[in-house]
Amino acid sequence: MTGSSKGANRFGDFLGNLRRVEFSNLRLFFGLKMGIFMMALLTIGLVFNHQLIFATLGTLFIAGSAMLVLEKQRSQRSKINILIVISIINASTFTIGSVVATTGFLVVPLSALVLFLICYAEVFPDSIVFIACLTFSVGVGQSGGDSIVIGERFLLVIIGGIWGILGSIIIPTPHSISKPKAEYIPVQQPRPKVTYREWLKPLLSNLSLRSESFRFALTLAATGAIGLLIAVDLGLQKQYWVLITICIVFLRANISTIFSFISMRIIGTIAGAAIASVITTYVNIPGLLLSFVFPFATMHLAASKVNYILATFLLTTFMLVLLNVLSPGQTLLPQTRILDTVIGAALALAGLFVLWSVSHWKT
């Protein structure tokens, strides 16, 4: 009887996580503003130079991370500095991924190595590690091009990031306007000098199987390599989507809510792929398809924290329609997106289960 009641409670928690909607996290003004800024670059790129899509990516990367920064109790100067750092990290990891994509059969082991190096040291905050893994994974999907072309992509992502930063701060959000000003001036303590040995301490101390950080990074890297290898072997059209799904599940899911998180991602992906399939099947003109991109992008940025199913649905629809704007006629992309997501989620679940099991071994 006790076992059945526990099972019922877990199932209730599972359903509760699926149905949870937090309207207080809805940011319509922010989504509209960043959607306009992103669409401006995208439209210019479609008219004059398709390479500007990489600048659009830079704006999208910043738009996805700006909300976390802008809503913290920080000064305007601090906000700008953090967003600039994030923009540089975005462009750097994206470029590294693009370089790795040109290495042929070495792409799998090199991708695993880079993911490991990004994750294991715990030198950066979790949000920056998450962003770096995602932008690297997207870069892995941008194969082709020599060093000059890859350098141009780096500059375009930087430009897009700066454009996104401008969009994030040029008009204060309602949240930041209502923030009360401090009535005192804190005394700034002098910063202690940090030696190279102290700076390297996290890198060296984590380099052991006894370190949870090391085991986590190693498991993520190994799972990512397996996922990418499977995607390459199956000849999937967008192989890096498997890698992205693995990174998202590893870096955003909690072990206690892992099934809910994965279920929400798969449900949202299937729903978004279905809508995108209908739109791209009956609308073949790039200009008309572009009119669908803006509302889905805006709604995704505004509702990214309201409900994960909704956020995944909007992002999936937005990305699949956008890819058909850039290269019309990709009718199989929705099915590929679903397959990649399921493969990545299943591998991530297995990897996290192994990691959880190992962490409970007695050493």
Image (tube, rainbow, N blue to C red):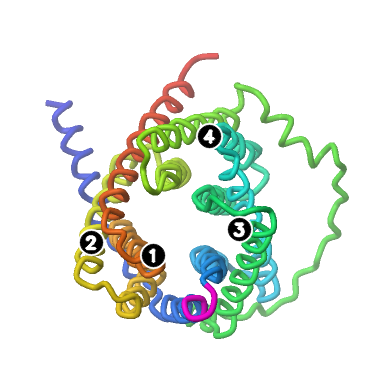
* Residue at 20% over, 48% down: 15
Q: What is the spatial separation of the Cα atoms under label 4 and label 1, in whole angstroms?
A: 26 Å
Q: Which residue is mark 2?
A: 277
Contact, CB < 8 Å: mark 1 with mark 2? no
Q: Nearer the viewer, residue 163 or 100?
A: 100
Answer with mark 3 or mark 1, whichever residue precedes in sequence.
Answer: 3
Element carrying mark 1: loop
Answer with mark 3 or mark 2, whichever residue precedes in sequence.
Answer: 3
Element carrying mark 2: helix
Q: What is the spatial separation of the Cα atoms under label 1 and label 2, in whole angstroms?
A: 14 Å
Q: Dot 4, crowdedness within 10 Å: few (<14), some or many (≥20)?
A: many
Q: Which residue is mark 1?
A: 327
Residue 37 sits inside the magenta stretch: no
Answer with mark 4 or mark 2, whichever residue precedes in sequence.
Answer: 4
Q: Quadrant of residue 259?
A: top left
Q: Which residue is mark 3?
A: 90
Is 46 left or right of 15, judged from the image as shown?
A: right
Answer with mark 4 or mark 3, whichever residue precedes in sequence.
Answer: 3
